[in-house]
Image: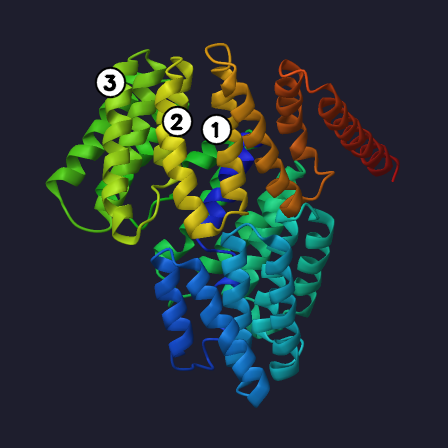
Amino acid sequence: MKAALVLAASLFCASGVSSGLAQDAVAPDRPIAMDPVVAASLKAESEGRWVDAEKMLLDAVHKAESSEADRPQVSLYFKRLSGLHMRKDQFTEALDWMRRARALDEKTFGPTDKSVVGDMSAIAQILRFLGSPKDAEGILNEALHIITPELQNSVERAGVLANLGLIYSSEQRWSEAQSAGEEALKTCESRPSMPSSACDGYRGMLAEIYRVSGRAIEADQVPVNSYLPAELADLDNQAGHYYRDGLLAQAEASYRDAIGWIERNPGMPAENQMPNELVMLGAVLERQGRDNEAEESYKDALQLEESRAKLHQLFPDCCTVDPLLNLYEKQGRIDELLPILQQALAVEQRNFGEESRNAAETLIALAGVYSRQGKKDRKNYVEAAALYRRGLEIQQKNMGSDDPDLVDTLTSYAQVLGTLHDDSTAAQVHAQIEAIQKKTADETRSTASR
């Protein structure tokens, strides 16, 4: 269940439907020319130069504030800074910038303007990432309350509804989630100027809500790949249906047909779909016990992504890296995990910063690999402990020291410390685990008693 909801959130965020973080400081009916600072920061960000992008925006903010420059432009800088911090998993900083943007937009355009509604949706999204769904739900309901009649079919309203759908889904409030998801998609599709592909994020979210709530037939009827050529979208959707139903031979045939279609019809956007088709073909082959063939398919997908990522010095998408890592781990090929993870860590630290959540998660993954190699060489336990410690330091800075998501990593760290006979530190870690578990249990009881 949890994995399905994570997938829904991934579809939602990847499609950009919670557009508050990315939307301009002014509404479409108040156009402004592309600001040169924004253009330069976007270019730097696309090239992985996160520090440069942030510096450009901060310098522009300081200059604009000292000269009382155009408020919409300053609000746009705030939103771009919030987006940068979101991409670096620095959610507290992202929240601060979006709140400043909202305050400025309210002062400039009024408290019920579409820019403000978009800001509120973005703030709610950040609150969800910070583990405050009730606060997020409250601000989204407030946004719905202030939406004026002329905004009923706006992209801002669609974003608010979609955010609510994700909150309801995370709490298994399926009826409310379905209603919100359906209304979000209906709102998006009601805009004649909106290309069909722009609503794919809403479709993907709604299909996943249907699927995890037991409405598989409705889920299969939602067309989630409208950005693809119709024939390719049909093949991909058909393959997905076969895969979910366990009809692996038919799924394999359909994915191979989709790959063949892309090879016969080069060009965008179909070429961008090729790594996904190769990964899914690998998954089908792996489920059939054909691991060698699955590995080749995963490698082909990763090679395609790597060739594109090198243009901007980025690391390939997680969706093409993780399947290969998982296969190697399943087969006990631990040594082959290290170079992939080390490369990922180097790029994440360069692009997102050394204290990003991405880097922390990779540090912890590396720690797990070294821990499993400890029987070969005790020095690996020492390396694992150092990696766990560094990863936890970053996580606690980003998430707080009492976040329930820390428990698994703290438990693994304590086990390594026990192996190294560092009983004093291990006791401190166990005490932290117990404190987190007690706090979580107290909060659960409090919620149940309301």
Q: Can residue 77 be seen in this view?
A: yes
In the picture, the quarter occupied by the C terminus is top right
In the picture, the quarter occupied by the N terminus is top right
10 Å crowding of disc 3: few (<14), some (14-19), many (20+): some
Identify the residue position indicated by label 2 in the image: 338
Q: Nearer the viewer, mark 2 or mark 3?
A: 2
Q: Does dot 1 land on a helix, a strand or a loop?
A: helix
Identify the residue position indicated by label 1 in the image: 366
Query: Camera-side residue: 187 or 425?
Result: 425
Q: Does dot 2 land on a helix, a strand or a loop?
A: helix
State how far apart marks 1 and 3 are (Cα).
26 Å
Query: Camera-side residue: 421 or 389?
Result: 421
Res. 225 image quadrant = top left
For badge 1, the amino acid type reads Leu
Identify the residue position indicated by label 3 in the image: 293
Whether 419 is drawn above or below 369: the answer is above
- Name the residue located 38 percent from the left edge and 78 percent from the top edge: 36
Residue 70 locus on image (x, y percent): 53, 86
For badge 2, the amino acid type reads Leu
Q: Does dot 3 land on a helix, a strand or a loop?
A: helix
Q: Which of marks 2 and 1 is nearer the N terminus?
A: 2
- Name the residue located 52 percent from the left edge and 72 percent from the top edge: 58
10 Å crowding of disc 2: few (<14), some (14-19), many (20+): some
* Disc sitting over residue 78 in the figure: none
Q: Earlier in the sequence, mark 1 or mark 3?
A: 3
Q: Which colour scheme is used?
A: rainbow
Residue 287 locus on image (x, y percent): 36, 16
Q: Which of marks 1 and 3 is in front?
A: 1
For badge 3, the amino acid type reads Glu
Judged left or right of residue 76, residue 95 is right
